[in-house]
Amino acid sequence: MSAPCDNQAGGLERPSFVTDDELERALRDTFARRVATPRPLVADPAGLAVRRARRVGRRRALTGFALAGVATVLVTTGMAQLGASTGPDGPPIVVLGDPRGPSPLPTVAAPTAGPVRPELDLIVGAWLYTNGGERWELTGVSPVERAQRVPDHGGWLLTSAVTAAGRTLWWMPPNGRPPQVLLAGADAIAVGADGRRVAWRDGTEVFAAGAVAGQLLATTRTAAPAGGVPVGFAGDTVLIRQPDPSGFRVWHSRVEDRLGTVNRDVLNVYGVRPDGLVVGQVSAGTPRRPCLALLDPARDLAPVRTGCGPELATDGHGDVSLDGRWLLVNGARNAALLVDLDALGAGGSARAAGPALTGVVTWTRSGAALHVDATGALVRVRPDEVTAGEQPFSAPVDGVAPGDRPVVVADIQP
């Protein structure tokens, strides 16, 4: 009967933990005892077995590293998204990576203003709240004065307030990446209501360009007289305010390299109707006073129709509804007026429309106008309610810091 082995019941003769060196020596001894003759072997069975074991160990280690690398790549590249099925019975589509970039913060309710429904995107402090419930941080953006949506879900164009260094224009991508500076140090910046055009003054020149995917393309330029600044667009035509002496002129930036003749009767411009006519304020009547007029941009803003009914302020605040019918503008008595432009010059009258305008007016596609009053509260003006005798009122916006003002983002004008 052979001697008992180490691992039989009779007690352990060596520790249960065996090192690699001990295992290698034991394996070599086992193969040596099985050799029948003492002559040297051409191949070393123990060495061969040990080398095979080492190769297997290396392959297993490399396999583990490869799997870990694949997992790391999948995690850092993005998450796997399950898309819609290719058909009623088709399998779901799996997309590796997240081409949209960072995900928005968890869906949040947009800041409220009591009974006033914002309807549009809002900028409150350093955050942009969309009407779809997303919230994006405006990293590196100084106080914003105006904001415009870009068509085709292309993000937002943000214009800074004036500073000692001039104005800045940012493009906020739709995927939440940090805003990108498109212009810096400009004397004045005007963004088209369609979100596709930008005009600005820099030094002694005025520039115009198309805004596409965060870039300014097809830039044109022209020399500008002292003080002349772009304030808006009528199609491809840039509207230029000339402060001294007062007046407005146009620049057909696509076909001309010079500004048009200044029209000194035009005091302010408010917006453009779908028919292409500019709604403006002119000096007319006897005695001369501020009146409303529809102006033709193809004829140096010559009046097409004029109405001198309501008493108007000359601060330039106001905007035209998307359908071109209504103008919300300041009256001469520190209150807003709603004017029916379809009745302009035909005895139409203006109606009181709540607190005075102190900045930008933004119209919604549902036909309401939103603006921020002198207290920083949000005002919503609906023409059907005003014409029925109801007065708009203001309500503070939640989350606005003392001394700060929310900014209503302009929707895309069709």
Image (tube, rainbow, N blue to C red):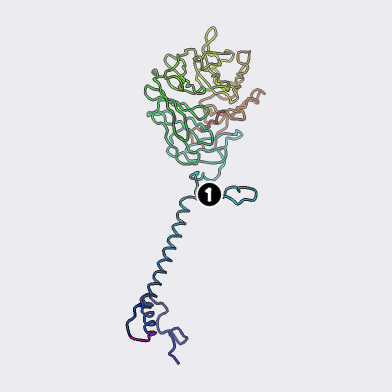
Q: Amino acid under label 1?
A: Val
**Residue under the point 48% across and 40% down:** 137
Looking at the image, which residue sits at the far right?
388
Spot the residue most to the bottom. 1
Q: Is residue 71 above or below residue 44?
A: above
Q: Which residue is mark 1?
A: 95
Q: Quadrant of the C terminus?
A: top right
> Does residue 118 appear in the picture of this structure?
no
Q: What secondary structure prevails in the magenta region?
A: loop
Give the residue displayed 56% in from the left and 13% down from the top: 304
Determine the secondary structure under disc 1.
strand
Q: Position of residue 209 (x, y in %)?
A: 45, 27
Q: Out of 66 and 268, give the one closest to the viewer.
A: 66
Residue 251 image point, x, y percent? 46, 19
Q: Please indicate whether residue 131 sits to the left or right of residue 205 in the image.
A: right
Q: Position of residue 118 (x, y in %)?
A: 58, 34
Residue 148 in sight: yes
Is residue 412 inside the magenta stretch? Answer: no
Tell me where residue 272 appears, x and y as whole percent: 54, 22
For residue 320, what is the image quadrant? Answer: top right
- Which quarter of the picture shows residue 134? top right
Q: Which residues are magenta?
A: 34-38
